[in-house]
Amino acid sequence: MKEACGVVGIVAPGRNVAHLCYDALFALQHRGQESAGMATYDNKQITVVKDNGLVSHVFSDTTLRALSGSLVIGHTRYSTSGSANWTAAQPVYRSAGASGFALGHNGNLTNTGELAEVAGIQVTTMLSDSDLVAELLSREIESGAAMQHALRSVLSRAQGAFSMVILESDTIYAVRDPHGFRPLCLGRLGTEDAPEGWIVASESPALDVIGAAFVREIKPGEMVTITEQGVSFVQLLEPAGEKEMLCIFEFVYFARPDTYLMGHQVHTARRRMGELLAKQSHVDADIVMGVPDSGIPAAEGFAKASGIPFGYGLVKNRYIGRTFISPDQNKREASVRRKLNPLRENIEGQRLVVIDDSIVRGTTTKALVAMLRDAGAKEVHLRISSPPFSWPCYYGIDTPTREDLLAANNTIEEMRDFIGCDSLEFISLENLRAAIQLDGECCDACLTGNYSAPTPVALGKGARW
Ligand code: SF4
């Protein structure tokens, strides 16, 4: 699985907002490593800088100095829809209105074909779903609508996942879809009595890194409007239900461990996943180890609850992206070896409990188990801190089709056999929800097949395509 972007918007009069945005984007690098971009407004015009590559590759001191003004939006991208080419990097710019506008999007729309058709647009001429939204907004603005009305008009027809930031002259708008699939939070620079600026971002560490205080999460369907004068809120779109449907995999895998989501720190939730997994599926073993990074806190929790010592068994190369960066199977297996190397002296002759966050195709896990056996592991017992991933995601995460999802087509015993481990168990959905301490709902469609928003293809349980 790959993440589907990070977004940031900052208004900070008198501060170098491009540098602040750089720091915030750096904190969101894990949400997308394909491209990065920023758009600033300097009271005259919007300037956009974006390119393929990591944040540190795209921006230099020189480019940051050229991005002046007190308003900025930023984006890190992994393409779940549309082209991976640099032209599809974000923010997307349109020249409609007095200053034009720039837009950054985290998520994935599920009715782009329909939206385009109604507007008489050939969907293939659009670079991505975000490009289509920008085009539709642009048409509304050219016909005289103010941005807030344009956003309501376009986004009320959009289905799927979106956490968006939009920069238009002296205003930043940030809006979350009616389900709240992808996270978005608000922070404040300065004190409550004397605010010096505001930031919206996908995850709270982007606030921490620039010294902003966490204020609150943006609600499903809500829009926050930020200017130099302050912030205001409006319920732009009717919420889809009583509770938000935040992606459960933000807790399991996508979000940083230091991120707070729905009031819970992700690291703590991951530790609890390990504790509950240990209670659910005991095994006699010598050492518990986690697959870096998200498997580590779950392994700590497993060790605590089981009494089996925690140890490190894999060293991660921190200078490459997340595992599924290669487009084909062989490269994917090679990328495991590039990313992880076993600590032989901790592994040799040991019965291992290995905690990982998920199994998608299974090829990476299979390569990992083979690597541990090569390093001398006596037994490898795999424990997974999410239930079987059996359904594709249409809400902003890049997953294979159902045909390629190991859990969609195999029993747990068949999966164990394919992977080559001694035993395999997944945390139950009930225990995962208990670990997150969920008060209400969360999206778990990839685990249950219960999609809360329309999908782009007709799905039925047991369907194959
Ligand atoms: S389908 Fe799965 S990965 Fe996609 S938003 Fe829902 S929980 Fe997250």
Image: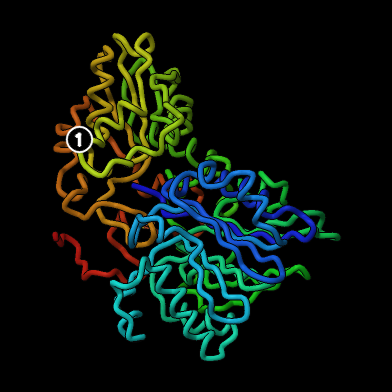
Residue 216 visible in rendering: no
- Residue 309 vertical placement versus 175 (above, below): above
Q: Residue at x 69, y 58 (%)?
A: 68
Residue 460 visible in rendering: yes
Determine whether the beta carbon of the residue marked 1 sits less than 8 angstroms from the nearest atom of ligand 1: no
Tell me: 227 left or right of 281: right
- Residue 134 vertical placement versus 418 (above, below): below
Q: Which residue is mark 1?
A: 330
Decide which of 80, 72 is in the foreground and name it: 72
Q: Residue at x 30, y 16 (%)?
A: 351
Q: Position of residue 95 (x, y in %)?
A: 53, 76
Quick one: label 1, few (<14), some, or many (20+) residues within 10 Å? Answer: few
Q: Position of residue 420 (x, y in %)?
A: 18, 27
Report the amino acid beneath label 1.
Asn
Q: Position of residue 160 (x, y in %)?
A: 39, 69
- Residue at the far bottom in the pictured view: 143
Decide which of 375, 443 is in the foreground and name it: 375
Q: Position of residue 64 (x, y in %)?
A: 64, 50
Tell me: 422 left or right of 20: left
Instruction: Find numbered disc 1 in the image and state the secondary structure of the residue it sits on.
Output: helix
Q: Residue at x 65, y 73 (%)?
A: 169
